[in-house]
Amino acid sequence: MADFDLIVIGSGPSGRRAAIQAAKLDKKVLVVDKRHRVGGVSVHTGTIPSKTMRETVLNLSGWRERGFYGRAYRVKQDISAADLQERMTKTLDHEVDVLDHQFARNRVRTAVGQASFVDPTHVRIEAEGGEEQVHSARFVLIACGTRPYRPAHIPFNGTNVFDSDEILAMPKLPRSLTVIGAGVIGVEYATIFSALDVSVTLVEPRPTFLDFVDRELIEEFTHELRDRNMSLRLGSEVTGIEFDDHGRPVCRIASGRDVVSEVLMFAAGRVGETDTLNLAAAGLEADKRGRVEVDPQTLQTKVPHIYAAGDVIGFPSLASTSMEQGRLAACHAFGLQPVPPPEYFPYGIYSVPEISTVGMSEEEVKKRGIPYECGIARFRETSRGHIMGLETGMMKMIFSKKTARLLGVHIVGEGATELIHIGQAVLNLKGTIDYFMENTFNYPTLAEAYKIASLDAWNRAFATSTSR
């Protein structure tokens, strides 16, 4: 008999969801995490801290009220790094407490230490003091998450050159910041610090960024960033980082147009935390970015009783999808056949302003050759937008001209990550433009943008002699 039915390596979104699902099936579960507190990257250095920092910045800076009171308006005049960290600490403590309680009431055992495979069915747990335990398991889930990619040519020093995890513990707020990498993490942090009136330069070697987002939305987003004096250096290859006579990092650009700032953050990618797992002993291997390959339907690795889920398996690397992956892996391991997840799930980018998208972009619709029409709504067209003092923000909806079905919803602006779920529901239920035009939305709300955008599309492509 194995010691445990399931050993989970990592307690992030996918690990904890798998552990609790297995426990609810009356299975004996052990969760192993090298941190002293559960939660994984999501709680300690990723999703929760960065989103808490964002909310704190928007509150203390008075960002949401500047449409009425001007760009100089602030709730707190002198915002410090300690102000940001105080709220992060409180939020983190609450998240850990909730997770500890969930594990306790579901009788999930936890162990602190570095996990590694002894063979395909045995896992070694090495504690900080050198103590070792070896446990056997019927099934193992690799849910160890990722860490920032730290190339050798970047002189990380924990003082003024940071990775995306270290930036959370920065001792003081800088007057200027260079962010290398215009992926989701780089864009989020760059815009958060820009909202604090820090002079930010975002450097990206590719000529475009966030390529999975509808291009019209990115154009709107880019215009807003430039309007507030944020510098975007797209198509700028970084050749090295040096320090000037004042100790400030200098980002050397291939074009010769260098960037000097008080602080530099490198946010160009992440790697799976698999290098310490001794995957070879389990008959597994990781790719050059530390990711483990799985069957996308079952989450099984090439060793059938070993599963992997979350960021360690790569795209889409979202906390929301990771949770579902963990649940599906546990269900499959113990013989359940859960209903497949809906076809469409939303992406949320917690930048300032937010971006959220679900379904096909206009570029994808064109590529598939689907006749379509778009409808646009500006948040300033809604009464709620007036009340909130919103000067920017837009919603774009895409409909099939042949069937009138919704194909995609794309939002940039205040509340985008909340608003997107209306579009997600209609999309997965194969709804049409009629839903948005015929239903009543609370007034005044930003959700009215759905009706405005749908009417815009109707008037462009569907209107007949009977107008709406």
Image (tube, grey):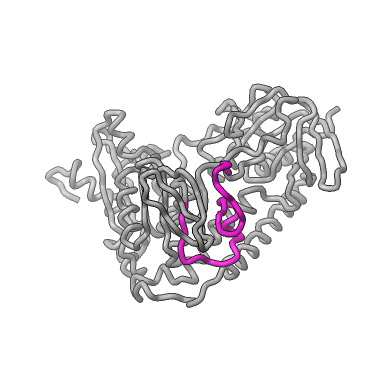
In terms of depth relative to the viewer, which is nearer, 418 or 165?
Answer: 165
- Where does the image place residue 317, in percent across and percent down from the top left? 54, 40
Give the magenta-colored segment's residue range: 150-179
- Residue drawn at 41 percent across, 68 percent down: 64
- Residue drawn at 65 percent across, 26 percent down: 285
Direction front: furthest residue: 245
- Where does the image place residue 38, in percent across and percent down from the top left? 71, 50
Quadrant housing the N terminus: top right
Is residue 426 visible to us here?
A: no
In terms of depth relative to the viewer, which is nearer, 242 or 234?
Answer: 242
Q: Is residue 433 left or right of residue 130?
A: left
Q: Is residue 342 left or right of residue 29?
A: left
- Residue drawn at 37 percent across, 59 percent down: 230
**Residue 271: quarter of image:** top right
Query: Main structural element of the magenta stretch: helix, strand or loop?
Result: loop
Was residue 385 drawn as part of the magenta stretch in this picture? no
- Where does the image place residue 381, in percent across and percent down from the top left? 27, 61
- Where does the image place residue 279, in percent across and percent down from the top left? 70, 28
Direction left: furthest residue: 465
- Residue drawn at 45 percent across, 67 percent down: 196
Q: Is residue 358 left or right of residue 153?
A: left
Was residue 158 drawn as part of the magenta stretch in this picture? yes
In terms of depth relative to the viewer, which is nearer, 268 or 85?
Answer: 268
**Residue 98: quarter of image:** bottom right
